[in-house]
Amino acid sequence: MSRDVPFKESRAFLLSSCPGRVATLLPLAATCALSEVMSVPASAPAVLELYPQLFAALLLRVSCTLGVQLPRTLQAKERRAPGLALASRNLDPCSSAAETLQVMLLRGGSEDVVQYVEREGGWESLRTSTGHEEGVARLASAMVKFAGPRLPLVMKALLGAHSSVYEVQRVTSTAFLAELLNSNVVKDLMLLESLLDNLAARQKDACASVRRLVLRGLANIASGSPDKVRAHGAQLLTSMISGLDDGDDPQSLVALEAMLGLAKLLGLVEPWDLRSVLLHVAVRIRPFFDSEKVDFRSASICLFGHLNKACHGNCEDIFLEQVIGGLVPLLLHLQDPQASVAGACKFALRMCGPNLEREDLAEAFQKHLQEGRGLHFGEFLNTTCKHLMRHFPDLLGRLVSTSLFYFKSSWEDVRAAAPMLTGFLVLHVEPEQRQQVDLEQLLTALQLLLKDPAPAVRMKAAETLGRLVKFA
């Protein structure tokens, strides 16, 4: 299987300009031959002896044949001889590799692994580019459950893929190793340290998917071996921060994985390790609050909540600034069109409450923002603004200025909530605080909202203008 490259770049079809990958014959024939040999019961001793090498070779064969086509010569033979043995075998390069891997596992005594992956839909996922990582994770989970003693040598066999010239093989091996850390079996098998070291060594990989999966694996320690997080806390946090700052991933998926990972780890690391990164993380995730991508909004806001939770009873002034700076976006995104984002805002605001050190404000957050309960947004916003202006009157100008930014939000409900927030702030302010607000700027912005295509936005803008008359 390794004597020739697994595929060659070609043209997918004669009339297409899209490049495609075509399987080379020798590795394809070797894969089919392995399946034939291992289908014979007498091959069992050899399969057991070579279990780790066969498992690794076939899994990596699956990965590097994703989307790879049969050579046209074999396609033609299949069409010409539909009744012959050639056509009875699935010669699709990826499918044949996945089927051979199943044959190997069955002959090697791992029937439970095959059945578990089948029940989870893993074999089907394994064959597709979009589901491959999930399929690999299901396979790794099955190996942990039913073939744990095999893992040390399987892991050793997969380590060679670390330097593979094929990006997809590096992705596959990293996805497999990352999922192992989701179980405490790796700790029992004394694999935890070596897995951590191996994943850490991959964090500089040129492939963003590999870097993303490294972070997923490191964060999996929180569920697989939570008692080991403190011992490795500094290393884990450093890796997550590096992922947040990853500048070579235009889609920011590495940063997204870092946010998800930090949310899992924060409650388990040493407070000292956490304090050293709190501010950096809070500043770095703030732009994602308003991302057009729902996953980024919900992950960043949820992480902000976990940062606040970790600070309870010990919130330094420099972090308190971040809490105050996050109030307006969190309040307005309670009206986010995506329920997951609104839910994350509820959680984050509940966690922010104690750090503001105003009991009535914290109680209002706890009362109105319970998970799973409906929210009377107007009543809540009015109450919140009343408490904010009572305890933090000097923040009026800053809160109004931030709210003005959302007058141009792309989400109608958020755009309608922004003048609503502004209106309640000015309603509850004392006369001596009026100079904080640039009335001319605010009036101009509201007049523009009166022309908004959304009726709800126009209505809230008109209500706020009414409050400004009293304010002025």
Image (cartoon, rainbow, N blue to C red):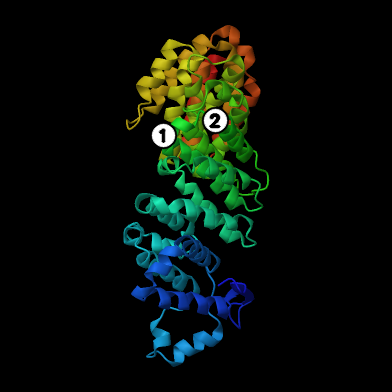
Q: Position of residue 445 (x, y in %)?
A: 60, 30
Q: Position of residue 256 (x, y in %)?
A: 55, 42
Which one is nearer the viewer's eye here, 389 or 134? 134
For label 2, the SS is helix
Of callouts 2 and 1, which one flags the residue occurring earlier in the amino acid sequence? 2
Residue 88 appears in view: yes
Q: Point out the image quarter for the N terminus.
A: bottom right
At x 64%, y 48%, the residue is: 249
Residue 453 appears in view: no
- Which tag is nearer the camera, tag 2 or tag 1? 2
Q: Quadrant of residue 430?
A: top right
Q: Amino acid at mark 1?
A: Gly
Residue 73 to residue 94: above or below: below
Residue 213 to residue 16: above or below: above
The residue labelled by disc 2 is 233
Q: Residue furthest bottom?
A: 80
Q: Position of residue 57 (x, y in %)?
A: 52, 65
Which one is nearer the viewer's eye here, 324 or 26? 26
- Residue 397 vs residue 87: left or right? right
The residue labelled by disc 1 is 343
For label 1, the SS is helix
Q: Position of residue 30 (x, y in %)?
A: 51, 77
Q: Quadrant of residue 99?
A: bottom left
Q: Amino acid at mark 2?
A: Gly
2 and 1 marks in contact (CB < 8 Å): no
At x 53%, y 54%, the residue is: 156
At x 67%, y 47%, the residue is: 248
Which one is nearer the viewer's eye here, 254 or 232? 232
Residue 24's mark? none
